Image (cartoon, rainbow, N blue to C red):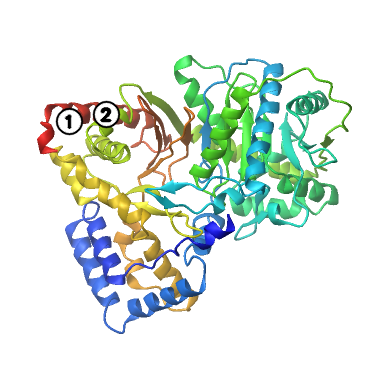
């Protein structure tokens, strides 16, 4: 593992002129001509010989020479740890698995035991550094994120959060946290000789936990983690003043992962089952359902409902979707193969319940958190749709990238609804580089704008993806130049104060392709109040979509966009079928 990491290239700093030219090109479809001219002038000043741009570019190149990755530490700070909106909906994605075939408490516990065993099986590969290295287009990828998702947790701060990873400590954690009826338990998952508990032993221990927490009379302390980060930062200081509380919180933070055994969920029709499941994974449905049965700061939470609803939620600072999905693919496959026996399990010590002393002030914080969470839950409109007409098979048959095909369909759908193009974010992996995270594929390009206006040529969009994953995209470079100015205590260049820059970063379409072997879908909220969050998983013969918007915004509607995307995909297939192959 380590030797593999050393062999990876460092993230390059793209040439300044190239980024400035590409930035202008990216602005073309989304800003007015006079705004574009103004930005062009600002960029010319910025690039003048011996000027500020050159100075910052030199500073960045120097930083790149001294660090493993010039971007990653800054990116985690700016994108996650200094971001003060709640992690719920705004930052942490949910993941919905296919419905499992159980419908009661007994089935829930049996499945949970298998799931824990599956995660431990994957953890062994991480611990032994035997995870097979992943490749993209023949190039090896950075595997570091796999080492960041277990035994880690976000810690709230007053102005900026931090992340702690206990996997690297001298005594790595040997327990997970189980939450049931808003009560937290420590479940040791290794025997004293270091061997993992068997699924049967885990089953017995989970039964003990459920028996010890059959009532929901406890205060839902976990709901505090749904708050605005500044409010939670203050409430956190207050909560851990008490030694019992501090020890309980520390036990949750140190745990390998969290398992949430949920109570009832709203009864819905089969049509809206998946959308309702996505809501449970993303935020728990509000205080009357399961939002208090979580610890949203935990990097990885597996969520299992009594009705067969299953999935996960992850805190985004340590990792992107693909490593999480790889772990989940492994776990799902593991649970399918595993049968629980009735072997004797011997007597194990009962899991320890974590105690919290709730003062009047903490109770007030909990009530405020419930209120805010319920407003957010009511505001989020989440639609999960399965596009069943075709999947990756159709674009592939026409020698096109399925991802590019879907992105252009999103552009077409948006244009048909609003009659203009908008800044569109698609995350691109930088894992070809050591400690690489993401950059932006700006799917709204002049080519895609011409296409949706004329409904013309979908093959042009692919070039943006290759640019982004090879470290030559513009967004993180621009961020780096801005951060470098702050680092050197220089005034922030005018180009970053420009209205066009704000427009370029106002992503009304925030999108992500998260492919998996399992027939699942990831989901997240919009990143701006008048925008959409769109996540999709293209399978061979269908595509899973999760589309979100906010109800308080009258101009957006997740169901309408989902419908428009379906129509766009069908119309694009018709266009392909009517076009002679030779012209493509």
Q: Which residue is mark 2?
A: 394
Residue 215 location (% of width, % of height)? 78, 24
What separation in Å lies between label 2 and label 1 (alpha carbons)? 9 Å
Q: Residue at x 46, y 54 (%)?
A: 431
> On the rendered structure, is 86 left or right of 475?
right
Q: Position of residue 167 (x, y in %)?
A: 69, 52
**Mark before the other along the chain sequence, 2 or 1:** 2
The quadrant of the rendering that contains the N terminus is bottom right
User: In the image, is residue 16 above or below residue 410?
Assistant: below
Instruction: Say if mark 2 contacts mark 1, CB within 8 Å.
Output: yes
Residue occupying the point 82% across, 36% down: 353
Residue at 69 percent across and 32 percent down: it is: 117
- Name the quarter where the C terminus is drawn: top left
Asked if residue 412 can be seen in this view, the reply is: yes
Q: Residue furthest bottom?
A: 50
Left or right of residue 451, residue 466 in this image: right
Q: In the image, residue 60 lies at what x, y percent?
A: 42, 73
How many other residues sit within 10 Å of disc 1, few (<14), some (14-19) or many (≥20)?
A: some
Which residue was labeled with disc 1?
576
Using the rendered view, name the quadrant where residue 348 is placed: top right
> Callout 2: helix, strand or loop?
helix
């Amino acid at each position: 593992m380590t030797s593999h990491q050393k062999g990876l290239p460092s993230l390059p700093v793209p040439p300044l002129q190239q980024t400035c030219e590409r930035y202008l090109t990216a602005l073309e479809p989304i800003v007015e001509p006079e705004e574009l001219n103004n930005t062009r002038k600002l960029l010319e000043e910025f690039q003048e010989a011996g000027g500020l741009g050159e100075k910052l570019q030199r500073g960045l190149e120097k930083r790149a020479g001294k660090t493993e990755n010039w971007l990653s530490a800054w990116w985690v700070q700016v994108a996650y740890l200094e971001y003060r909106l709640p992690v719920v909906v705004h930052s942490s994605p949910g993941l919905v698995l296919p419905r499992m075939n159980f419908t009661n408490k007994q089935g829930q516990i049996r499945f949970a035991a298998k799931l824990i065993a599956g995660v431990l099986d994957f953890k062994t590969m991480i611990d032994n550094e035997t995870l097979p290295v992943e490749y993209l287009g023949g190039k090896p990828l950075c595997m570091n994120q796999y080492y960041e998702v277990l035994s880690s947790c976000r810690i709230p701060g007053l102005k900026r959060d931090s992340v702690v990873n206990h996997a690297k400590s001298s005594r790595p954690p040997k327990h997970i946290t189980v939450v049931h009826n808003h009560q937290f338990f420590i479940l040791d998952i290794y025997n004293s000789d270091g061997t993992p508990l068997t699924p049967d032993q885990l089953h017995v221990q989970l039964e003990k936990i459920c028996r010890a927490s059959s009532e929901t009379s406890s205060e839902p302390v976990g709901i505090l983690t749904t708050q605005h980060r500044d409010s939670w930062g203050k409430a956190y200081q207050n909560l851990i003043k008490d030694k019992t509380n501090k020890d309980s919180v520390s036990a949750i933070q140190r745990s390998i992962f969290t398992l949430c055994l949920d109570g009832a969920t709203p009864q819905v029709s089969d049509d809206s089952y998946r959308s309702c499941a996505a809501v449970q994974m993303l935020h728990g449905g509000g205080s009357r359902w399961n939002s208090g049965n979580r610890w949203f700061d935990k990097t990885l939470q597996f969520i299992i409902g009594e009705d067969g609803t299953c999935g996960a939620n992850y805190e985004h600072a340590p990792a992107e979707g693909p490593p999480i999905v790889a772990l989940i693919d492994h776990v799902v496959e593991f649970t399918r193969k595993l049968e629980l026996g009735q072997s004797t399990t011997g007597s194990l010590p009962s899991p320890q319940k974590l105690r919290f002393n709730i003062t009047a002030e903490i109770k007030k914080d909990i009530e405020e958190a419930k209120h805010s969470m319920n407003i957010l839950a009511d505001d989020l409109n989440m639609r999960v749709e399965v596009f069943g007409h075709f999947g990756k098979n159709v674009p592939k048959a026409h020698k096109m990238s399925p991802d590019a095909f879907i992105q252009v369909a999103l552009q077409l759908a948006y244009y048909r609804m609003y009659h203009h193009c908008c800044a569109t974010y698609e995350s691109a992996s930088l894992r070809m580089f050591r400690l690489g995270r993401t950059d932006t594929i700006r799917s709204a390009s002049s080519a895609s704008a011409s296409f949706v206006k004329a409904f013309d040529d979908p093959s042009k969009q692919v070039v943006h993806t290759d640019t982004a994953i090879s470290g030559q995209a513009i967004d993180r470079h621009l961020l780096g130049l801005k951060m470098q100015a702050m680092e050197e205590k220089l005034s922030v260049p005018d180009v970053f104060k420009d209205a066009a820059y704000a427009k370029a970063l106002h992503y009304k379409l925030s999108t992500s392709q998260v492919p998996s072997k399992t027939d699942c879908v990831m989901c997240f909220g919009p990143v701006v109040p008048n925008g959409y969050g769109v996540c999709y998983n293209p399978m061979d013969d269908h595509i899973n979509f999760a589309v979100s918007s906010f109800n308080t915004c009258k101009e957006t509607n997740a169901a309408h966009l989902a419908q428009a995307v379906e129509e766009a995909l069908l119309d694009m297939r018709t266009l392909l079928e009517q076009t002679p192959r030779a012209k493509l």
